[in-house]
Structure formats: C-alpha cells, structure tokens
Image (tube, helix red, strand yellow):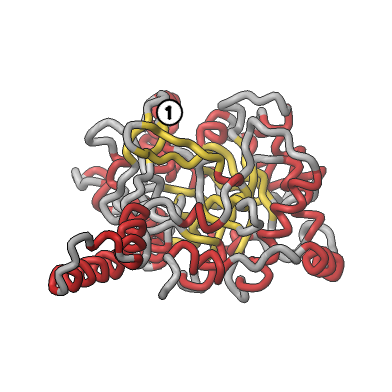
Amino acid sequence: MALPAATARAAALCRIAACASASSAAAAATGGRRGAEKLPFSLAERGMVVGGHRGMGMNAVGAPPGARIEAVRERENTLLSFGRAAAHAAVAFVEFDVQVTKDGCPIIFHDDFILTQETDAVYAKRVTDLLLEEFLSYGPQKNSHEVIYSFFCWLLLCQVHGYECIFEMPFCKLALMLIVQISKPLLRRTSDGRVVNWSAKDDDSLCTLQEVFERVSPRLGFNIELKFDDDIFYERSQLDRALQAVLQVVSQYASNRPVFFSTFHPDAARIMRELQSLYPVLFLTEGGTAQHKDSRRNSLDEAIRVCLEYELHGLVSEVRGVLKNPSAVLRAKESNLALLTYGQLNNVWEAVYIQYLMGVNGVIVDLVEEISNAVADFSKPVLNQSMLGSGVDLVGAKHQAFSQQQLGFLLRLIPELIQQPH
C-alpha cells in the first residue's frame, strides 16, 4: 500500500543530518574576502532588477476588500507561485523564507507559527518544532484527488459486496484518515490579532527547499531569506545547525542558478558569510521604520556598518527607510554594496521609479506582473518630449518620459506615499 503523501515526501527529501563537516570543508576551500564574488545578478550591470515576493506576491490575509495586494491569486511560497513568477521574463528572482524543521530539513514558510483548526479549537505550533512529515501534512496535499477517487472506488466496492459496516475495513479506515488529513485547514493570524482562514484562489501544497531547486526553472534566481524568530535568542550552535542544513541543499542542487542569501539576523548573516564565499549574503533591515533591542537592526547607517564589518555584499531595506534617507543610496554605492528594497510601496510604480532614478539596484514586489513590466519600461528610450504636453496618459504611454516639473511632483509625493497604507 502506498504511503501517505506527506510521509513519502518526508522520507524522500529529508537527508540533511550529516551535512556539517562537508559544508565547513567547502567553505574553507572557497574562502576569500567580499568583492571576490559577483554581486547578485550582476546588479551593477543590469540596472534595476525585480524580484517576486514569496513568488507572485504574499497573501494579504485579512486585507480589506478591494485592496490592491488582494489581487495575488497564488498561495505564497509554493511551487505554483514560483513557477508563474519564472514565466515572466522581466522577473530576475523570487524571494522566499526558509526555516529548518526539527529533523533538519529546510522548508519554505514565512510565519514562525503554523495554525490549524480542529473542531472549534485553533492550534498553533512553532514551525521549527515540527518534523518534516507533520509540516507537509498541513494544507492541500499533492495527491488529494487520487486519494478521494480511491476512497470512493472502495466505498462502491464495499457496497457491491454487501458489507454492513464498510468502515471496519482497514483500507477504508486509512482512506478516511487521509481525507481528514487532506481537509486539514491552514489558518493565519492577521496584523490586528484576528485568526482567519488562509485560502488562495489558486492553491498548492507546502514544499521544501530541495523541491524548489528541482522543479522551478533554473533561469530564475533565488533570494533565500534565512528566517529566525525575533523573540528567540539563538546560540551559535543553533544558528550553525540551521545554516549548515540550508547550505547542504544549496550546494547540492543550485548548479548554475543565481542564488543569494538575506536575513534580518545580523549574526546569522555573519556566520553564513564565514561558512562560504560562493553565494552573496545581504543584510535585511527595516531601515529605521521599527526599533529592536539589537541596535544593529535600527537604521540604514547601522545596516551599512554591519555589511562593512562582516564583509557582506549588500543590504535589503524596507523602502520607506530608503525614501526617508536617500543619501544612504550613495553611501551604499561608495561602499560597493548592493541595495535592494522591499515593502508595500514597491507595489506603487511611481515609488519604484523614484528608486530607479536614485540608483537602487532592485525591488522585491507583490504585484509582480505590473511592476516588472513598469521597470522594463524605465530603461526604454525616452519618449518624444512633445508627448509631455499632448495630454497623453504617461502611465499608459511608458514611464520614462518625465520632465523636471513632473519629477519634482513625484519627489514631493514621497511623504504622502510613506504615510499611506497600500
């Protein structure tokens, strides 16, 4: 009899435990200082690149009806979402969140806790406390239609043979258990504390880092965010274990795919830089838009200092931090650091265009098709200046053709953009 989907996938994918010595040896063999590696996607040569946030965009669970971000159809951080992002030629990479299960397998999931519901109770478990098999049992299953079809075939067979209590048959019991597993819902906690059903118009199952490397087009780059809980103090050994597990998968399956790491955890960034020098490491920062106990996380200036001290390759900032402190772009360039941004304002093409003019290397976005097409337009030849006074809709006509007056308007718009929810 075939194993349940989650069990079979767990057995096939979780071969990570003995990776520490191999990864350390690889790091020693490729040692070197920052600057020896190429920056992600040759950022200095390509101008602005676009990355898909968690694939085709994050799921705005609990967003008000009509919110632009609600347009994302695919479940975030899934093979379906990554595959659709790869179909857009203007998308250079996807950003996704990697955590490591209790049995040492890197998986793709953003939240620190995974929520489900049984009867009327909501249950939350820390993702890193789960074994791989249990993690994969959440949400829709890959072979759900096959299981349901098999169950109903056996149900019909039982009725034909006149069994009075068909559910005493072992296979029927197993099928019922699998159907319960298939229907196990995923819930999510919103920013205001509500717990709501987490559904997507185009759904897909949860996945592992190995599966993503194996099944997503190799032309698409990967920005692997090394995810750690802000509320936990991690010992060096805990960080080493998680980072080594991720490195083992990357070194085995990346091949020639463009890959770079990012993380909000300064020490994880430093350790990943020490462990290897093949893949660039960038420091994630909120750019001063939020405060933390660790002062290294509290400003763009601190982020740049961290990058230089730990010999990192660049930073990824919340976009509002950059718009509030545009001189940081120049300091990053003078320090030979790549600068990318993330955040809701990156779904507003005017805000992205301002960053393009400022020299920001890349943007991570949720409205992938819209913004990637807009950025592709930025680099096209300037439109005939006569169009500026002809009443032509610049949004529809291409975004490159801005007069100084219009650019001044966009710059004055920045404070309003920063304050508005998107």
Q: Which residue is mark 1?
A: 191
Q: Is residue 284 visible?
A: yes
Q: Residue at x 67, y 65 (%)?
A: 16
Residue 379 horizontal/vertical position (percent)? 43, 58
Q: Which element is circle 1 on? A: loop
Q: From the viewer's side, name the closer residue of 202 and 320.
A: 202
Q: Is residue 312 left or right of residue 82?
A: right
Residue 212 horizontal/vertical position (percent)? 50, 65
Q: Is residue 307 left or right of residue 178?
A: right
Residue 129 horizontal/vertical position (percent)? 60, 45
Quarter the N terminus occupies: bottom left
Res 158 quadrant in image: bottom left
Residue type at numbered disc 1? Ser
Q: Residue at x 55, y 71 (%)?
A: 12
Residue 30 horizontal/vertical position (percent)? 82, 68
Q: How many discs appear?
A: 1
Quarter the C terminus occupies: top left
Res 344 quadrant in image: top left
Q: Residue at x 74, y 39 (%)?
A: 234
Q: Residue at x 56, y 32 (%)?
A: 321
The correct choice, above or below, for 312 with respect to 167 in the image is above
Q: From the viewer's side, name the closer residue of 345 and 406.
A: 345
Q: From the viewer's side, name the closer residue of 355 and 288.
A: 288
Q: From the viewer's side, name the closer residue of 244 and 264.
A: 244
Number of other residues with Cα within 10 Å of mark 1, as a class: few under 14, some 14 to 19, many 20 or more: few
Q: Is residue 373 visible?
A: no
Q: Is residue 18 left or right of residue 179?
A: right
